[in-house]
Image (cartoon, rainbow, N blue to C red):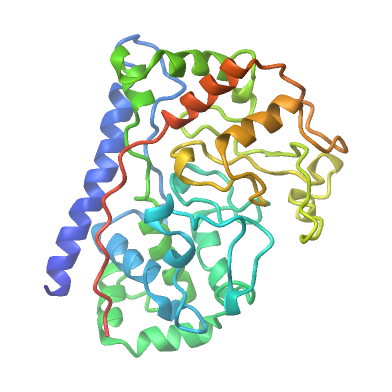
Amino acid sequence: MNTEQRLIRHGREALIILLSCLIFGATASAASGKPDPYRRPAVAAPADNAVTPARVELGKMLFFDPRLSGSQWMSCATCHNPALGWSDGLPTGIGEGMHKLARATPTILNVAYNKILMWDGRAASLEDQATGPIKAKAEMNQDMKILVQRLSAISGYAEMFEHAYPGEGITEKTIAKALASFERTVVATESPFDQWRQGKETAVEESVKRGFKLFTGKAKCDACHDGFNFTDSGFHNIGLETPKDMPDDVGRYAHRKVKINMGAFKTPTLRDVALTGPYMHNGIFNTLEEVVDCYDRGGDVQGNLDPNIKPLNLTSQEKQDLVSFLKSLTGKPMLVTLPQLPQ
């Protein structure tokens, strides 16, 4: 299969995903005639990096190519594995030389909707974030000048970059733009919860319906996990203990020195959350039940605690209902075909 055929095939896949976002977003609240806060928004992109089949195809190639790392054995997909909820299934990530990282690998599912990225919010856009892990010595440990030279020496990549970004060449900026374009197609599929919101009462069990009522009521989960992507894009200290083998992590405070940010981390999406454990920024909990128990206790460390975190006094049944609701946010797996990398 030549480059043009690959572009057509993978471009079709990406456009189908994006069209489904627009169609579902337009119909989700049709029954009530009112704007639905859980309605899927359209996927936006900056003016200089509109999503096109050629850019998505190039970004996908780069995402799965281990040659982007200094060791040439680690790709973006090593940590953001589509078979593991676009994460890695580990408490915390593993980087260069099997080095254990301090934070869990966040899923990239629905990052297209994020207003700010990374656990501590240090990246303002997908383009800004894309090359961060590549350059980080503890992660992929790649010198971008060497990477540009390496990719430029591969004729297949030279052709694809020119097709995707005519006249811009192979640079750190175009590498970031291509990766961001692919990541904008990694979006959640329709879940049982979404079907229920559209009026299909049989899409979920009664436990899910009770759980959603708790989520938006007594448990007050939607104070931080709101809207279609179930995140306020904010930063909160939720009272987590730091494992003994890990250093204290100041979180958002490292980049914005306001007291409330000490130990505060970005609110993650809850889409496909049943697939993305272990949970929290430090991977301290293995199950959703453990997560719910922590919130029910009002956190475990009271210092600088977010004011929204208070004991909930949930019953055993209510906890089960909340977990049932969270599991209802899982859609069918996004179909991903592995690319044949240029040699």
Q: Is residue 338 above or below residue 263?
A: below
Q: Residue at x 27, y 74 (%)?
A: 160
Q: Is residue 67 above or below residue 232?
A: below
Q: Quadrant for the N terminus, please.
A: bottom left
Residue that extends furthest to the front in the rendered view of this protein: 316
Q: Residue at x 50, y 63 (%)?
A: 130
**For residue 25, which quarter of the picture?**
top left
Q: Is residue 90 above or below residue 101?
A: above
**Left or right: where does residue 120 sit relative to residue 332?**
right
**Left or right: where does residue 176 sit relative to residue 13?**
right
- Which percent across, then down, holds residue 320? 54, 22
**For residue 59, which quarter of the picture?**
bottom left
- Which percent across, then down, holds residue 333? 31, 45
**For residue 91, which quarter of the picture?**
bottom right
**Left or right: where does residue 280 sit relative to residue 206?**
right
Residue sitting nearer the eye, 334 or 171: 334
Residue sitting nearer the eye, 32 or 296: 296
- Which percent across, then down, holds residue 114? 52, 44
